Image: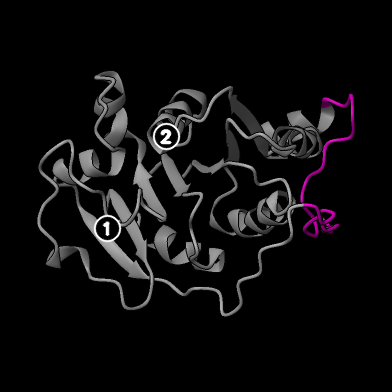
């Protein structure tokens, strides 16, 4: 089975917490597969999120960056992800996600049993208790998929048709093999002040970094050396 993975991170005005979030993901993803990439999609931010994302992409070859000039929403972000990545699996983390990233492992472990794995918070209604999302205008569950692992081939028809239907609603209507995982929520949620300086976060130990102007590290990453 192809275990390549693209982690999709749509963000909006996220300059303060972006580095910490990316580095946290870069600690978790290598545990899942050696063939991964992290795609940051800036959805028309008005702050310095694009600059922060470019800096991270310059340092880490595992990180890539795409920018929407205007705010287009989660469906456009997923469409961009499908067009700009190559992972057989896509790990989607919504802008509003409040689930623990450490629990990403639980979703990944179920990939052999399902084409779509959804993370839900404690106490949220299981999917089988909700009506099937049959119409394009139906509300998705949960809100655009806080945290989800989806097989790329499941969404290719959605992108090919340029459908306006929410991607998660479309995926569920395809009646895929679907699993749910109850995930934790952070015990403490802290939102930094907008004008506060961004925290300095040390890079994960052993993670490949890319010095400016060097191609050797990129080659090593691609070849798995």
- How many angstroms separate mark 1 from mark 2 (CA)? 23 Å
Q: Which segment is the magenta one?
A: 195-215
The secondary structure making up most of the magenta span is: loop
Query: Which residue is drawn at the image coordinates 18% and 44% (left, top)?
Result: 138
The residue lying toward the viewer, choosing from 198 and 46, is: 46
* Image mark for residue 78: 2
**Residue 199 sits above or below residue 88 on the image:** below
What secondary structure is marked by label 1? loop
* Image mark for residue 133: none
Relative image position of residue 15 (x, y in whole percent): 72, 45
In the rendered image, the quadrant that contains the N terminus is top left
Q: Is residue 113 left or right of residue 25?
A: left
The residue lying toward the viewer, choosing from 184 and 59, is: 184
Circle 2 Cα neighbour tier, 10 Å, few/some/many (<14 / 14–19 / ≥20) = many
Query: Which residue is drawn at the image coordinates 10% and 43% (left, top)?
Result: 134
The way the protein has been coloured in the rendering is one colour
Q: Nearer the viewer, mark 1 or mark 2?
A: 2
Residue tagged 1: 113
**Residue 85 sits above or below residue 22 on the image:** above
Query: Which residue is drawn at the image coordinates 42% and 38% (left, top)?
Result: 74
Q: Is residue 224 magenta?
A: no
Q: Quadrant for residue 136, please give it.
A: top left
Q: Earlier in the sequence, mark 1 or mark 2?
A: 2
Q: Is residue 182 left or right of residue 114?
A: right
The number of numbered badges drawn on the structure is 2
The residue lying toward the viewer, choosing from 104 and 187, is: 187
Q: Is residue 206 magenta?
A: yes
What secondary structure is marked by label 2? helix
Query: Which residue is drawn at the image coordinates 48% and 55% (left, top)?
Result: 96
Circle 1 Cα neighbour tier, 10 Å, few/some/many (<14 / 14–19 / ≥20) = few
């Amino acid at each position: 089975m192809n275990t390549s993975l693209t982690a999709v991170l749509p963000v909006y005005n996220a300059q303060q917490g972006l580095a910490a979030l990316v580095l946290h993901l870069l600690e978790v993803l290598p545990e899942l597969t050696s063939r991964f990439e992290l795609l940051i999609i800036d959805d028309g931010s008005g702050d310095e999120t694009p600059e922060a994302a470019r800096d991270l992409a310059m340092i880490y070859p595992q990180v890539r960056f795409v920018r929407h000039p205007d705010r287009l929403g989660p469906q456009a972000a997923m469409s961009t992800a499908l067009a700009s990545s190559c992972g057989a699996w896509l790990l989607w983390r919504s802008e509003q996600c409040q689930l623990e990233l450490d629990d990403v492992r639980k979703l990944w472990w179920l990939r052999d049993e399902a084409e779509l794995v959804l993370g839900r918070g404690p106490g949220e209604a299981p999917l089988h208790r909700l009506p099937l999302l049959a119409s394009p205008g139906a509300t998705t569950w949960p809100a655009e998929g806080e945290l989800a692992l989806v097989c790329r081939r499941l969404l290719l028809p959605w992108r090919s048709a340029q459908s306006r239907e929410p991607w998660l609603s479309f995926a569920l209507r395809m009646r895929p093999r679907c699993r749910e995982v109850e995930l934790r929520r952070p015990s403490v949620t802290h939102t930094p002040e907008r004008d506060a300086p961004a925290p300095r976060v040390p890079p994960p130990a052993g993670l490949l970094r890319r010095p400016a102007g060097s191609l050797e590290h990129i080659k090593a990453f691609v070849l798995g050396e």
